[in-house]
Image (cartoon, helix red, strand yellow):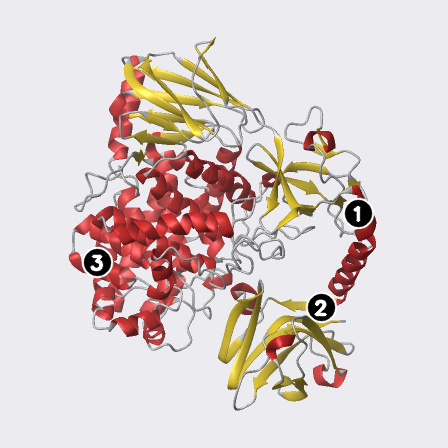
Amino acid sequence: MKKALNLTILLLCLAASALGQYPGQFDDRMKVKVVVPVKASAFPLSEVRLLDGPFRKAMLLDQEWLKSLDNSRLLHNYRVNAGIKTSAKAYGGWEELDCELRGHSLGHVLSALSMMYASTGDTAYLNKGNQLVAGLAECQQALNRDGYLSAFPEKFIDRVIDRNPVWAPWYTLHKMYAGLIDMYLYGNNQQALEVVKKMGSWAYNKLQPLSDAKMQEMLRTEFGGMNEAMYNLYAITSDERYKQLAEKFYHHSVLDPLAAQQDKLEGLHANTQIPKVIGEIRGYELTGSDREKQIPEFFWQTVLKNHTYAIGGNSDGEAFGPAGKLSSRLSDYSTETCNTYNMLKLTRHLFCLEPSVRLADYYERGLYNHILASQNPEDGNVCYYVTLRPGGKKAFSEKFNSFWCCVGTGFENHAKYGEAIYYKAADGGLYVNLFIASELSWAERGLRITQTTNYPEQPSTTLTFAAQKAVSMPLYIRCPEWSKGGISIKLNGKPLSVKAAPGTYATINRKWSNGDKLEVGFNMSLHTEPMPDNSKKVAILYGPVVLCGELGKKPIDPAFGVPVLIAEGKDINQWVKPVNGSPLTFKTAGVGQPNDVQLIPFYKVYDQQGTVYWDIFSDADWQTKKQEYAAAKQRQAELESRTIDYVGLGEPQSEHDHNFEGYLSETDVFNGRKYRNTHDGGSMNFEVKVDPTRAVNLFLTLWGNDGKRNFDIYINGRKLENIDYEKKPNEFFDVIIPIPHEYTGVADKVTVLFKANSTGWMNGIYGLRILK
């Protein structure tokens, strides 16, 4: 056995030298070291292997998807842009040739392949990544532009610098910077480093002449984590130009309020901001700047307190809303998956600097209830948004036709589940943060620790030690805040008396010997979590697991709608009961109107409609509310049943799907609702579905305080109506405008255009539907 263990550790030592991007990893590869105190260090992915369980299953599905990707198709638009002959066809969605974000997926795929190689040791992923890097190097050489490399022409960068309309070119380039850096760090690909250094030099030469004012104008367009990528490149090379470039990507209008401890996130596109903050904490690690420390700490606390739903995700319609106002912001566009990918990334950096159970608890919450829940457990497809609309159903990607941003991060999410289970403590000890079946091979300690568990289906986990020789060290076991009464611990079959209060780490400091076995039990219980702005709208959880009501595969009957719970003031254990023989399955008992419901983990719901948040009433309140409640449900159901098409105004994916074009058009959020408007002769138009056999109605929602504003509506270039409404103080109101059949003809789609008058603003439009 010693021989086998020695060989395992030797192999892992060799692999470990090329892994990681958090403090404690890559020390031998970084020319610029972390300069701030680090209290916990991340393990390389190569030192953790997943064992059977839901996370390994998710990883296996991701592996099949990655293997099925055609390198020629991923490289197609890069080759077209470089003038290299190609007979391939680009993938669908945001990779199509007419999409300005084309090329972003290849960067994500490089990261995912390198992480999957590190997580499994399977060189098939490394070889596939190496081939992609070689193809990119060929494109870079063919372009011969001082290092420029992209799937789109360099004029896109010129357009964003000059504030001409273009969809986030730096965001797309950031994915390539990150992917190439990952291929170097995780896969030891030297060619990837040379390519990304040239890209960095090109970016420096492009942006260094810009004034700060010009740069800040450019930064109004989403740029991903360019600051983080440049800090990482600076750490690898010690080239000061990359550090200067990272600092140029400091976005004052967003980051300065955070540095001043002010929550001014309302209305901002959520995932545009999170990578900026990750870049700041990476800058803090490398420079020690106090400002760069304060920003991520305040941001994380603020997002968790004011903008986060029960599943750990944030945003509705991709935007942050008013602080603490979440109950009216539950839709099919809630909780973009990219946001939680990035929030977990930020959490890992924060944990390395100052370990805490609160950080680890959030990580667990987001990992189980959003990231794991975002994957279809049958085919591995993933969600862009993980809907929280009561009665909503998750919408998954199509494997080769939906290359959205959350497909890109989806490739990565399920390749790196091993990265936050364990951390090295600064005192030589070990943090056990997540209870996921896995094996840690800690080469420098000569330890192999196997974690065996069916958690969360069973509230326990077991750690078994294999050691060449006894190792003295403290072991820190997370005692989650939700584990009321603490945790129980047995060592080699005997109860161990350890302080283990919820929200702390249970510390066991001893000499660990070969064969030691530590058994940990948790006190998992049912509890509700109310909305911060509405105590009568609650999520139901069992321990850290968010439960979802199963509402079936058939459309919900509008006459009944989503059930409500008549349970206010009652002990949850009286009205939610476990289903015998079915782990993590519960049923409400006599409190559901019009019926009781079965509850299962949200991460297991994928092929039916479901509800996470429930309206909860007392018996007395229900008697006075039920008629009003039923009428409101009926009105909404009737509107949905009449809807031919719906445009999510200000929502990038929905507007892209409806071929939005605008001149002097802006989007913002008011009273928790997104809107779009235009001014001074500007216009905005969308392509919408209609009924080719008959007349339809245009349905608009406006805000009454916008006042007497004047604008025109056109259908396929033909003027339909002039809108000229008086004020309707302090209320949203709906307008229904008939569209005669002669305006649409036999087409199944038409272009609806809104044009402001030559001076002043048009009304903000908060809702846009085409109705039967």
Q: From what the image shows, is residue 156 above or below residue 744? A: above
Badge 2 amino acid: Ile
Is the C terminus in the top left, top right, bottom left or bottom right quadrant? bottom right
Q: Residue at x 52, y 65 (%)?
A: 652
Quadrant assignment for the N terminus: top left
Q: Is residue 491 above or below residue 764?
A: above
> Where residue 348 sits in the image (x, y, percent)?
37, 41
Q: In which quarter of the image is residue 216?
A: bottom left
Q: In this rendering, is residue 549 above or below 167? A: above
Tell me the residue that label 1 is attached to.
622
Q: Is residue 408 left or right of residue 576?
A: left
Q: Which residue is drawn at 46% across and 51% down?
A: 303
Closest to the camera, between mark 1 and mark 2, is 1
Residue 72 appears in the rendering? no
Q: Residue 428, how many percent across, how many down?
A: 27, 25
Q: Are marks 2 and 3 in contact (CB under 8 Å)?
A: no
Residue at coordinates 36% horizontally, 73% vertically from top-left?
A: 160
Label 2 sits on a secondary structure element that is strand
| For marks 1 and 2 on the same chain, the one whose residue lies earlier in the sequence | 1
Instruction: Look at mark 2 in the image and give the residue it sits on.
Output: 644
Residue placed most toward the observer, 327 or 66: 327
**Amino acid carrying mark 3 in the image:** Tyr
In the rendered structure, are the residues bearing label 1 and label 3 in contact, judged by CB atoms less than 8 Å apart? no
Please name which of the two marks, 1 or 3, marks the residue nearer to the observer.
1
* Residue 242: numbered disc: 3
